[in-house]
Amino acid sequence: MSLESRTIFVTDKNNEPQKLTYELERKRVKNINLRIRSNETLFVSASPLVAVKNIDDFILSKSDFILKSLNRFSEKRKWEIDNKKYVSGESFYLLGKQMRLIVKQAHQNLVEEDGIYITLACKHSDDYLLKKRLIEKFFCLRCYEEFNKIIERCYPLFKKYKVPYPNLKIRRMKTRWGSCIPSKKQITLNENLIHFSERCIESVVIHEFCHFRYPNHSKEFYNFMTILMPDWKERKKELDETVLN
């Protein structure tokens, strides 16, 4: 596969110049196809019959969408644990709050937070895999702690509708913040929600609770959700504008 790298300049919403570089593949396709990758690179495929100027014009016409998407991917990388080096000074997000990491040598492995700093004490402070494992365990435990608190807080809204108290499962999901299986009395939440504010987590929990009564996204479902959480659109927007999966 032969790829051509091209660069064009666009202006953002503040009329500041921005450089966009994209990889162009010539292939037998009907339309000009654009893909924005999670590593913040652009890939375009187009027929050999389409002039380069037309492809550049297509990118220009999509520049607002492209810049917004790239910004959202950039925001996502700020809190993704997989992209961390686990060194002092790095930022981590817990319940919507940005915290700085402090790494120090210690006789036992321990992770603590005080609302400002996350302190990672470990026997081998230069062991990347050890530090990664300790931080992942810390966030996993906080997931169960915080998510259960929010479920317990939200449940009284649904108890009168004879919705059963759910079992909580937590896992990493690429395209969903949550899911549920009413027949199993189960709610599953995306582990990455722990990085967002409680109001965002609460919105996902209530969304999944509503599915216990309405299994699809019908008009009745959204009416019910609006009754219980009138500002759900604002909360959803907060989630959507912070990360693009």
Image (tube, rainbow, N blue to C red):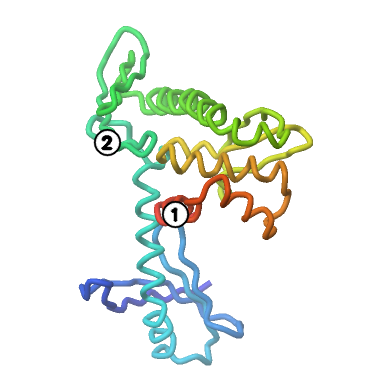
Residue denoted by label 2: 90
Give the side of residue 62 with respect to residue 14, left or right: right
Based on the displayed image, in which of its 4 quarters is residue 9 positioned? bottom left
Based on the displayed image, in which of its 4 quarters is residue 62 positioned? bottom left
Residue denoted by label 1: 234
Percent across and percent down for residue 69 are 41, 63
Q: Residues within 10 Å of mark 1 (few under 14, many from 20)?
A: few
Establish if 156 lies above or below 199. above
Percent across and percent down for residue 209 are 64, 40
Q: CA distance from mark 1 to mark 2?
A: 29 Å
Q: Looking at the image, tell me whether mark 1 or mark 2 is earlier in sequence order.
A: 2
Front residue of this view, candidates 18 and 176: 176
Which residue is at 68% across, 33% downward?
160
Q: Amino acid at mark 2?
A: Glu
* Secondary structure type for disc 2: loop
Which residue is at 69% across, 33% downward?
186
Establish if 180 lies above or below 16. above
Residue 86 is labelled as none
Percent across and percent down for residue 107 are 31, 7
Which numbered mark, 1 or 2, is in the foreground of this view? 1
Which residue is at 40% across, 39% downward?
197
Specify the farthest residue to the top.
Answer: 107
Establish if 76 lies above or below 28. above
* Secondary structure type for disc 1: helix
Specify the farthest residue to the right.
Answer: 183
